[in-house]
């Protein structure tokens, strides 16, 4: 389907302009939805109407819009302008900077959908035979000779409300962040979306922080992985290190997970766990050698689900699986985004924002943290589709498992 926005302004009601335009659209088989309708209350204030149009192809859309021109309809169907990158790692000046909403470009008299949606990238285009293709391209991945869209002509972005049009409840929940919202209902909604994603063959991505282990919730995370409710795991050095520490030594940051008490020299436990895994060579090899016998990372290895551990400047060790080059870490995360239908972000600000930056807006995203600032930062940085749930991770994970075990409503 081809989408376009059409604007009408003037004495539209007195002259039945809107009625005439809608008749034209119906005649050409163009669907419409009224996006804005502002009635001019005084003679110097014209009525303004904005329509979102949908047509089966570009030719049909052009014919309908041209027929509407005589009634003062304004629209823009100019093709995109392209520029060639003149060096590696640098986009052309005035490159079009992307959002994470569904995007199409008009090129070769056809609307082409932009692949691998991601915010803050350029749009790289190329031809395969007579067919044009387009995809987002991070700045560091630009190569000399690549063609990129510049400016805003010929670019159409689907509004967020269109991304969420099949789920009014999700759209309502993503409108605000508060600790006083109905948590159980929101968690039940996340569980239903996970069930739906699994039925539709889409992936579920889990992004987790070390508080999951500190709170004693790592066994619940392992249960979700074991039950095939998680297909991909993103985290940092800390979640994996403390999960392994808990399995090897029964502590997390030196705190006994059974009694809540400290241990002599417990502050060194996570270092000893990391050291043992480094000697083995990887988390997988440590599992194979019997050094790790349980926990979330153990279950991920046994289930064969991919995990990406992205490092930071404060990491101890780190574990041998941690990617310490952040650009490489970003690119590795990008490899697993395709096909994701639901993303759960639990108790991590850094990795939630990093993941949100590369997620399409169509992905149902739930951000859970005991601190509202984490959720606010995520949406402030462009992940507007995220549903924010201000609660502790243990409550969320326990309730989620219960909802997943219950039959679908």
Image (spheres, grey):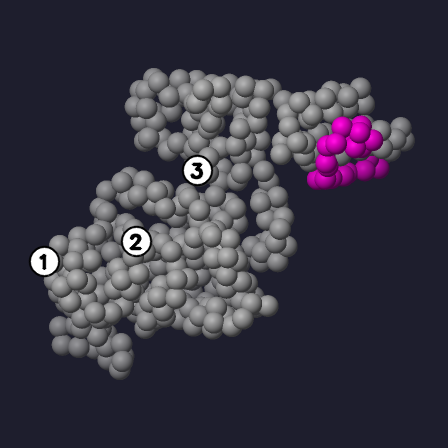
Q: Quadrant of the N terminus?
A: top right
Q: Kindly identify which residue carries mark 2.
A: 307
Q: Is residue 275 magenta?
A: no
Q: Kindly identify which residue carries mark 1.
A: 279
Tag 3's secondary structure? loop
Q: What is the crowding at mark 3: few (fewer than 14 residues within 10 Å), some, or many (at least 20)?
A: some
Q: Residue furthest right?
A: 14
Q: Earlier in the sequence, mark 1 or mark 3?
A: 3
User: Residue 242, how many percent across, how many down?
Assistant: 24, 65
User: Residue 280, how many percent across, how many down?
Assistant: 11, 58
At x 43%, y 55%, the residue is 204
Q: Nearer the viewer, residue 158 or 40?
A: 158
Distance of label 1 from label 3 (alpha carbons) = 38 Å
Q: What is the crowding at mark 1: few (fewer than 14 residues within 10 Å), some, or many (at least 20)?
A: few
In this picture, which residue range is highlighted in magenta?
A: 22-41
Q: Residue furthest bottom?
A: 259
Distance of label 2 from label 1 (alpha carbons) = 20 Å
* Residue 54 lies in quadrant: top right
Tag 1's secondary structure? helix
User: Residue 207, how many percent across, how many down?
Assistant: 37, 56
Tag 2's secondary structure? strand
Q: Is residue 150 visible?
A: no
At x 32%, y 56%, the residue is 305
Q: What is the crowding at mark 2: few (fewer than 14 residues within 10 Å), some, or many (at least 20)?
A: many
- Disc ID at residue 116: 3
Does 41 sit above or below residue 215? above
Q: Earlier in the sequence, mark 3 or mark 2?
A: 3
């Amino acid at each position: 389907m081809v989408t376009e926005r059409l604007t009408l302004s003037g004495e539209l009601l007195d002259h039945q302009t809107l009625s005439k335009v809608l008749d034209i659209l119906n005649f050409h088989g163009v669907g419409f939805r009224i996006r804005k309708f502002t009635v001019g209350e005084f003679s110097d204030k014209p009525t303004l109407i904005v329509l979102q149009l949908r047509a089966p192809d570009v030719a049909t859309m052009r014919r309908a819009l041209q027929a509407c021109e005589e009634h003062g309809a304004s629209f823009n169907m100019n093709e995109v302008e392209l520029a060639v990158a003149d060096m590696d790692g640098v986009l052309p000046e005035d490159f079009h900077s992307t959002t994470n909403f569904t995007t199409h470009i008009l090129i070769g008299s056809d609307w082409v959908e932009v692949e691998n949606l991601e915010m803050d990238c350029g749009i790289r285009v190329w031809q395969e035979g007579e067919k044009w293709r387009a995809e987002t391209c991070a700045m560091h991945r630009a190569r000399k000779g690549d063609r990129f869209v510049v400016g805003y002509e010929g670019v159409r972005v689907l509004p967020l409300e269109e991304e969420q049009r099949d789920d009014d409840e999700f759209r309502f929940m993503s409108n605000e962040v508060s600790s006083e919202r109905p948590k159980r209902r929101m968690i039940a909604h996340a569980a239903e979306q996970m069930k739906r994603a699994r039925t539709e063959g889409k992936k579920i991505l889990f992004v987790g922080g070390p508080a999951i282990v500190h709170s004693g919730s790592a066994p619940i995370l392992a249960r979700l992985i074991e039950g095939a409710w998680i297909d991909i795991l993103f985290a940092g050095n800390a979640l994996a290190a403390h999960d392994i520490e808990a399995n090897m030594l029964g502590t997390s940051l030196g705190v006994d997970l059974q009694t809540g008490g400290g241990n002599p020299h417990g502050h060194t436990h996570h270092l000893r766990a990391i050291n043992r895994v480094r000697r083995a060579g990887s988390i997988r090899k440590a599992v194979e050698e019997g050094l790790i016998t349980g926990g979330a990372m153990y279950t991920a290895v046994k289930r064969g689900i991919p995990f990406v551990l992205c490092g930071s400047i404060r990491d101890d060790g780190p574990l041998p699986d941690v990617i310490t080059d952040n650009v490489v870490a970003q690119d590795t995360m990008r490899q697993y985004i395709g096909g994701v239908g639901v993303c759960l972000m639990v108790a991590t600000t850094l990795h939630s924002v990093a993941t949100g930056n590369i997620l399409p807006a169509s992905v149902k995203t739930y951000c859970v943290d005991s601190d509202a600032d984490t959720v606010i930062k995520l949406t402030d940085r462009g992940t507007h589709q995220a549903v924010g749930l201000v609660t502790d991770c243990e409550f969320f994970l326990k309730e989620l498992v219960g909802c997943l075990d219950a039959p679908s409503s």
